[in-house]
Image: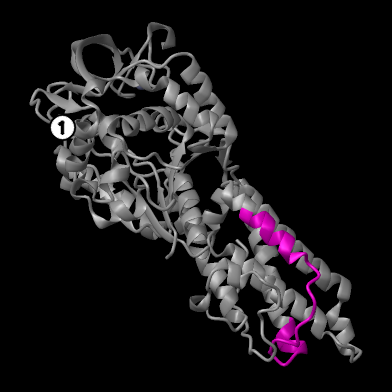
Amino acid sequence: MKKPYYITLTIPYVNAVPHIGYALEAIQGDTMARYQRLLGKNVHFVYGTDENSLKNVQAALRAGEDVKSFVDRHAAAFERLHDILNLSNDSFIRTTEARHIAGAQKLWQMCNPDDIYKKTYKGLYCIGCESFYAKDDLIQGLCPEHNTAPEDIEEENYFFKLSKYQPQLEQIFLTDTVRVVPEGRKNEMMSFIKRGLEDFSISRSVERAHGWGVPVPGDGSQIMYVWFDALTNYLSVLDFDTDGKNYSTYWLQPNQTPREVVHVLGKGVSRFHLIYWLGMLLSANIPLPTEEFVHGYITVNGQKMSKSLGNVLDPSAIVDLYGQEPFRYYMLAGVSAYQDGDFSDERFKEIYASDLANGIGNLTSRVMTMLIKYNKGVVPKAASNIFDIEGFWKQYRKQMEDFAFHDVIHNIQTLVTACDATISADRPWEKAEQGLHVGDTLYRVAEGLRHIALALLPIMPHASGAIFSVLGLSPKNIKTLDRECVWGLLLEGTPVKKPEPLFPRL
Ligand SMILES: [Zn+2]
């Protein structure tokens, strides 16, 4: 039986259309999902939209629109990322769906009853952040994120007894029971836990929520705090409410065969995912995820994206301009998976030229032209591997397991360079003219190119398929990485094709 692998993206607010920060996460998650499928696992990849946030209500009010039609419109824009970015997600969840509402209420009711209690809360609340601030966290009395004065709020809320789980959470990170990538993010959480965990509010009054959100079971005066409801999407998308088949297949079940449950998230929400979420699951006695990957933020031309600066980039506009796969490539190659990264047209064009047009695209065209010109358009007799292909795949797997996409790309480009260098050193065009044997050189670079195409499959599936197809192979016949990663699978006599330019110069 194929090993189950469940991978999720965070669900963004739908108070605006998607920007490239979310595209970064989506492309990283999709690349991992495709890689895991290549390993032969039973992958389930999901994302969705967080629609119960007060931010959505406010944005709808500002736009003079009915909240439901406002969130419908924006949710559709996020769902379209599936096509725009070629996401291979298996499901999509909207937190206004009945299965989500029922799932969130079920989790609430599964929490240990001692862990949820009511108390009067008084504090400074920023509506933009949907969170309370301590006086010390404000900058001249204003929210550090929004530059607005928080509201003084006093009301009865439900609280979750997070403090009780402090020792358990500490132990979880000490023993890597939940693996956090990169390591630095784990250390941040450890020091946050060590400062002492406080109970947190998990509901708000119906009035403050404008009646929008998931009702607290058994209490008509309260709506779930948006974070409590939003995090449960990772269960509700699997039909947790009805104990659906996807839930038992993809979420860890006690005493069952091991499987992987992986969350992909941005650094700004790591506390919610690594502490609050795990606390909630512990309370409900539901097995924890196995891995959480935390990526950085993306800036545009070195500046933080913001509406006021007018530099919020729409991924579909970039895709229209440069193409879907070059954009996917840039988000993995031009941005470190672990740190903050930058998007600029200038850098995009640089990477496009060096890695795609002059790199992968040019190598493909060189190899195919030579096979057609000097070997009658067929694959020559097999020749030995001179590229340390075993070492290449060992590194590739390790880098993928570590979500180190920038290193994956570097590794692939090193192989592209090695193939180019082989051609330059062997000079097959001179040898062919002198009637000398060029088959070994041609086989090596053609087989090298096949390995490059295989490595690119999770990153740029179309370009990868195009390379396979000019090499006379059908992308549909690609089996698992284990099967495909050995040297010498290109068969002598296979007819090759003349390639269309893969990455035309901009
Ligand atoms: Zn704020």
State the residue at coordinates (41%, 28%): 275
Q: Is residue 330 above or below residue 478?
A: above
**Magenta extent:** 370-397
Residue 392 is one of the magenta-drawn residues? yes
Residue 351 in view here = no
State the residue at coordinates (80%, 77%): 384
Instruction: Indicate the amino acid at tag 1.
Output: Trp
Q: Is residue 145 above or below residue 101?
A: above
User: Secondary structure under badge 1?
Assistant: loop
Q: Is residue 269 above or below residue 464?
A: above
Name the one closer to the observer, 460 or 196: 196
Instruction: Left or right? Give the position of 169 relative to 417.
Output: left
Rendered image quadrant of residue 454: bottom right
Residue 417 locus on image (x, y percent): 76, 62
Instruction: Left or right? Give the position of 239 relative to 299.
Output: left
Rendered image quadrant of residue 418: bottom right
Name the one closer to the observer, 84 or 337: 337
Residue beneath disc 1:
212
